[in-house]
Image (cartoon, rainbow, N blue to C red):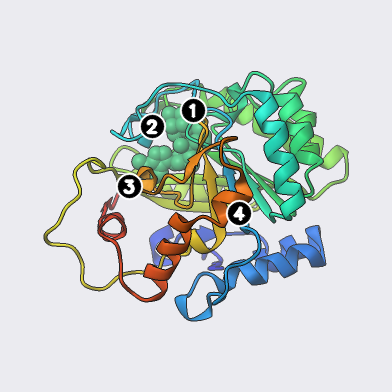
């Protein structure tokens, strides 16, 4: 994992996109979460390069993304929720399906879980119950991506007990810019993060790991260095991301596609289920082209062993890239 140390008075872009106060953030997480975590991270890292992909299909995905809800308390102007393929019906997964999904994921031995989905997970109506199910499913790694504005009150303790990583998307270093990028109250967000860090310290814990992120855009670019300065010694990870501009996922391009294909590991390690219960092996906006079925009509195990995903793996492995994948790799990145 890329990890860089900031030199004082230097711009973030002279040093890279990920920063940490821990000299080796991967090693730090292994020291917090132990040998089983290290072993899963080794398998995970091997999927990053086509050359080191496991040739046989792993018996279970390494990563499950469960969209508890696509409802959100904000409406960030850049968010891909507004894109053609995601501006769908707003829905949350019923808690009885979360229960059976967690049971099946536990039986399969899936290593990691992301409960972000396409919205704000802290708006999920049965969150305390869902977090309890998550905590008992035996994952080695659980990510909770959030805008952080609802990370307070009774739910905070449950979050701290149930997840390994909290990823707070901020995209600003001042109340004025936060209002533009996210449309929320910056001071409330800072209070919530303080309360979380206090709780972690009072309980003498090093987890959940705190990652804060900043999508670099025209509207906030001037606060890049201030953001790093503010968070480098507070968060465990500070990430700067590119803005992804979403094309029309319904209109696949057939011309001007890149000849070189950058590796994609999703079908070799990932299953995603949306809040509309649709299962796919793809985390991009093009996942609708690889829908395997809806849960529980098709189980996670059946999805993982389905022909759709087997064919996709075979094509990627043989470098016969489907048009959908070539469109995905060609999607627009807007540098801030
Ligand atoms: C869709 S959000 C869901 C979780 C939560 N609501 C949040 O804001 O963190 C997941 C992540 O996607 C990022 N994101 C949303 N739209 C994006 C875009 N157009 N380009 C890059 N990242 C984006 C958000 O900043 C966030 O880190
Ligand atoms: S808070 Fe997250 S999901 Fe909601 S609009 Fe903003 S980026 Fe999208």
Dot 3 beta carbon under 8 Å from ligand 1: yes
Tell me the distance, in whole angstroms, between the alpha carbons under discs 2 and 1. Answer: 8 Å
Q: Which residue position is annotated with label 3?
A: 244
Residue 226, image x and y in percent? 47, 46
Circles 2 and 1: CB distance less than 8 Å? Answer: yes
| Ligand 2 under 8 Å from disc 2 Cβ | yes
Numbered disc 2: secondary structure = helix
In this figure, which residue is indicated by the disc labeled 1? 70
Write down the residue under mark 4. Answer: 63
What is the distance, in whole Å, between disc 4 and disc 3 at their CAs? 22 Å
Counting from the top left corner in percent of width and height, residue 182 is at: 42, 28
Query: Which element type, helix, strand or loop, lies under badge 3?
Result: strand
Q: Mark 2 points at which residue?
A: 81
Residue plotted at (26% across, 42% down): 249
From the viewer's perspective, tell me whether residue 83 is left or right of residue 101: left
As measured in the structure, the alpha-carbon distance from the residue carrying label 2 to the one carrying label 3 is: 12 Å
Point 37% across, 76% down: residue = 318
Q: Quadrant of ligand 1?
A: top left
Give whichever of discs 2 and 3 has the lower sequence position.
2
């Amino acid at each position: 994992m890329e990890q860089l140390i900031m030199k004082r008075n230097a711009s973030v872009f002279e040093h890279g996109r990920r920063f940490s106060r821990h000299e080796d953030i991967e090693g730090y997480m292994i020291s917090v979460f132990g040998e089983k975590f290290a072993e899963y991270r080794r398998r995970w890292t091997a999927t990053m390069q086509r050359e080191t992909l496991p040739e046989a299909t792993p018996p279970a995905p390494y990563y499950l993304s469960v969209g508890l809800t696509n409802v959100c308390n904000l409406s960030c102007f850049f968010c891909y929720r507004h894109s053609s393929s995601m501006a769908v019906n707003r829905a949350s997964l019923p808690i009885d399906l979360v229960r059976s999904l967690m049971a099946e994921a536990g039986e399969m031995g899936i290593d990691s879980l992301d409960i972000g989905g396409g919205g704000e997970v802290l708006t999920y109506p049965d969150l305390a119950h869902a977090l309890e199910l998550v905590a008992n499913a035996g994952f080695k790694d659980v990510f909770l991506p959030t805008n952080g504005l609802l990370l307070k009150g009774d739910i905070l303790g449950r979050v701290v007990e149930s997840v390994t990583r909290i990823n707070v998307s901020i995209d600003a270093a001042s109340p004025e810019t936060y209002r533009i990028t996210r449309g929320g109250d910056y001071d409330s967000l800072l209070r919530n993060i303080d309360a979380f860090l206090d709780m972690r310290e009072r309980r003498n814990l090093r987890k959940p790991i705190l990652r804060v992120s900043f999508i670099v855009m025209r509207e906030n670019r001037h606060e890049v260095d201030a953001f790093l300065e503010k968070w480098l010694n507070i968060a465990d990870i500070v990430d700067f991301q590119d803005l992804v501009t979403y094309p029309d996922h319904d209109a696949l391009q057939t011309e001007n596609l890149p000849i070189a294909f950058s590796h994609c590991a999703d079908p070799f390690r990932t299953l995603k289920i949306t809040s509309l219960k649709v299962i796919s092996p793809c985390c991009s906006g093009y996942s609708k082209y690889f829908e395997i079925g809806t849960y529980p009509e098709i189980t996670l195990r059946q999805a993982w062993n389905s022909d759709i995903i087997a064919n996709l793996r075979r094509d990627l492995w043989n470098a016969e890239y489907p048009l959908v994948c070539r469109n995905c790799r060609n999607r627009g990145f807007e540098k801030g």
